[in-house]
Amino acid sequence: MQHIYDAVLNHLTMKTTGALLVTGDWGSGKTYYMKNVLFPQIEANTKMTPIIVSLYGVTDKNSIANKVLFAYLDKVGKNSPLSAATLAKGAHKALESFTWLKKFVDVNKLFVGSGEDLFRLLPKDDLLICFDDLERLSDKINNEDFLGMVNELVENKGNKVIIIANEGVIDGGIKFKEKTIEKTIHFTNDLSSIFDTIVANYEKADFKQYLSQNKDFILSTLDPKHENEQETARLRVLFSNIRTLKFAIEHFNYVFSLVSKTKNIGDTIIQKQLKDIWLFVLALSVEFKKPNSITFTDKKKLDEPLTQLTADQLGDIIWALE
C-alpha cells in the first residue's frame, strides 16, 4: 500500500487548491487503511494532526461543522482534560448558571454555534480533515453544499482535506468535482496484508496456525473466475469485501473450534473437509451480505439435502467411514 501513502503524503506537502478524493468499492478497506495505517504514519512522519469525520446520515451543514470541531477536540484532548465531551459538559454548565442570559439568548444555540463559524476555532495549519462516507450523505443536504464547505476549509482556512467515497454509486457523480477536488486516488486493497492483520487479531494459536498455513488457499477463494469478464469483476468485488471476509473468518472460527475438539486437524480428510466448510461459509457470508439475502423464511434452498452425491463426495464419505 506504499503507493497510497506516497500519493497522500505528496498532497499534504504540496501547495494545493483542492481536496484529495480517495475512491474505491464498498468494503475494500479504505477507511480501515486510513485510520489504522495511514494516519499513524502521517503523525509519525509529519507535523499534521489527522481527524476523520463520517458523513453517514448527516442532514445539515451545522452537523458537519460540529462533528469536525468535536473530532479535533477529541484528538488534541486525548491525553488531557481538553476533550469534546469535557468541553461540551463544562461550557454548557457554565452558561446555564447565568440565568439572566437565558432570558435573551438560547444557551444551546450559543454553544453549538452556526455552521462554518465553528471552523474559526480550528487551527489554520497542520490539520488534516478526512471526510468519510460521502455517498451516504443524507438527501436533505446536497453534494454542492458540502463541497462548498470543503472549499472554505481548503482555500480560506488552508486546511488539507481528504474525502473518502465510493464514487461509482453516487447518482450523476460528484457535481462540480473539478472545482473542489484537485486529485483522485483509486483505492485497491492488498488482501494479503489485510488477511495477515485479521489473523493477528485472533488469540487461539491453533486457529491462527491453520489460517496462516492455508493462506494461499483462502486468498485464492477470494478471487473467483467466470467465463464472463463482467461477472468475474462483479464477483471479485463481492468476495474481496473486507467486512464479508472478517464475517466469514469469524464464523469459520466457530466451526473450526467444534471440529478441533473431536478431530485431528492434521488428518488429510479433516483438512479437506475444513476447506469444503470454508468454501460453504464464505459463499454463505457473501450471500448473507447481499441485498435481498437469505432470511429465516427464504433460505435459498440451502437447508435442502443433496438429492445426488457426486463420485468425489461419495468417495470422501466412504474414506471417512473406513
Image: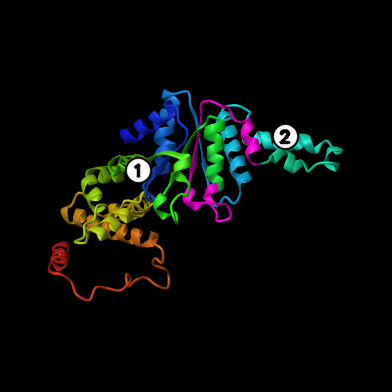
Tell whether 303 sits left or right of 51.
left
Point 78% across, 36% down: residue: 95
Q: Which residue is mark 2?
A: 91
Point 22% across, 76% down: residue: 307
- Corner quadrant of residue 22: top left
Depth check, front residue: 20 or 206:
20
Depth check, front residue: 76 or 207:
76
Q: Which mark is in front, 1 or 2?
A: 1
Q: Earlier in the sequence, mark 1 or mark 2?
A: 2
Labels 1 and 2 touching (C-beta < 8 A): no
Point out residue 243 in the picture as x, y percentages from the top left corner. 39, 51
> In the figure, 148 relative to 254: above or below?
above
- Determine whether the residue tagged by mark 1 lies in a helix, strand or loop: strand
Point out residue 210 in the picture as x, y percentages from the top left corner. 26, 46
Residue 56 appearing in the image: no
In what quadrant of the picture does the N terminus appear?
top left
> In the figure, 56 relative to 285: above or below?
above
Name the kind of residue labelled 1 in the image: His
Point out residue 75 in the picture as x, y percentages from the top left corner. 55, 32
Point 26% across, 60% down: residue: 231
Depth check, front residue: 119 or 1:
119
Point out residue 222 in the picture as x, y percentages from the top left corner. 27, 52
Residue 100 appearing in the image: yes
- Corner quadrant of residue 82: top right
Assess whether residue 126 is covered by the magenta stretch: yes
Q: How many marks?
A: 2
Name the kind of residue labelled 2 in the image: Ala
- Determine whether the residue tagged by mark 2 lies in a helix, strand or loop: helix
Q: Which residue is mark 1?
A: 186
Which portion, as a residue range, is magenta? 115-144
Point 42% across, 36% down: residue: 36
Depth check, front residue: 67 or 211:
67
